[in-house]
Image: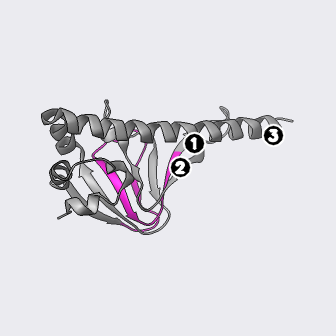
């Protein structure tokens, strides 16, 4: 079982009260993945919000550069100790928008998506805090994606000559 004190170690839960963390700990479990494990793929139902305790996970998307070229897998972000991923667990339609692939052995706290959403529905303040933390993750990922997109478009322009 995950303790509320353990959740305090994650930036995602900065500003959460002890009673709120106790509620969240009740829907959390620990999971371990070997290097090379695909935790989830783009389009999978979002079953958990993940907090990485150790290891590295890359968040990837397929980029299509033309009809006669195979898709290229682009790394959008690298998630490491203390960071979170899987925000789709709390945002409709609850489908992962990126894939998550372990590049090291990884240990994570997984917060059950249905349990998390139930807590958000029951406690509006807790729901607000979760959505605020989630919005910050989405904003950061969007920034990383924009940087990659600009670089990719520049590369594709260079390779057309």
- Is 44 colored magenta in this rendering? yes
Q: Classify mark 2: helix, strand or loop.
A: strand
Image height check: is 40 above or below 55? above
Please tell me which of labels 1 and 3 falls first in the chain.
1
Residue at the spot of label 1 = 144
Q: Which is nearer the eye, 126 or 147?
A: 126
Please tell me which of labels 1 and 2 falls first in the chain.
2
Q: Classify mark 1: helix, strand or loop.
A: helix
Measured as percent of width and height from the top left, residue 27 is found at 18, 52
Q: CA distance from mark 1 to mark 3?
A: 23 Å
Q: Classify mark 3: helix, strand or loop.
A: helix
Measured as percent of width and height from the top left, residue 89 is found at 30, 41
Please tell me which of labels 3 and 2 falls first in the chain.
2
Measured as percent of width and height from the top left, residue 69 is found at 67, 39
Q: Is residue 50 left or right of residue 137?
A: left
Which segment did they paint magenta? Answer: 33-60
Occupied quadrant, residue 66:
top right
- The reply to whether residue 34 is in sight is yes
How packed mark 2 is, by other alpha carbons closer than 10 Å (few <14, some 14-19, many 20 or more), is: many
How many labels were placed on the picture? 3
How packed mark 3 is, by other alpha carbons closer than 10 Å (few <14, some 14-19, many 20 or more), is: few
Q: CA distance from mark 3 to mark 2?
A: 24 Å
Residue at the spot of label 2 = 77
Q: Are marks 1 and 2 in contact (CB under 8 Å)?
A: yes
Measured as percent of width and height from the top left, residue 10 is found at 35, 56
Occupied quadrant, residue 55:
bottom left
- The reply to whether residue 45 is in sight is no
Image height check: is 107 above or below 96? below
Residue at the spot of label 3 = 159
């Amino acid at each position: 079982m995950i303790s509320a004190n353990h959740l305090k170690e994650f930036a995602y839960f900065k500003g959460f009260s002890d009673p709120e963390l106790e509620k969240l700990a009740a829907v959390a479990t620990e999971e371990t993945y070997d290097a090379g494990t695909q935790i989830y793929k783009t389009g999978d139902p979002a079953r958990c919000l993940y907090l990485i305790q150790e290891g590295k996970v890359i968040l990837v998307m397929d980029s299509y550069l033309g009809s006669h070229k195979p898709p290229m897998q682009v790394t959008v972000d690298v998630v490491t100790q203390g960071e979170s991923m899987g925000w789709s667990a709390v945002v409709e339609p609850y489908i992962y928008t990126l894939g998550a692939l372990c590049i090291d052995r990884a240990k994570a706290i997984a917060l059950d998506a249905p349990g998390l959403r139930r807590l958000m529905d029951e406690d509006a303040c807790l729901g607000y805090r979760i959505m605020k933390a989630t919005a910050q993750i989405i904003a950061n990922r969007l920034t990383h994606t924009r940087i990659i997109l600009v670089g990719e478009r520049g590369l594709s322009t260079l390779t057309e000559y």
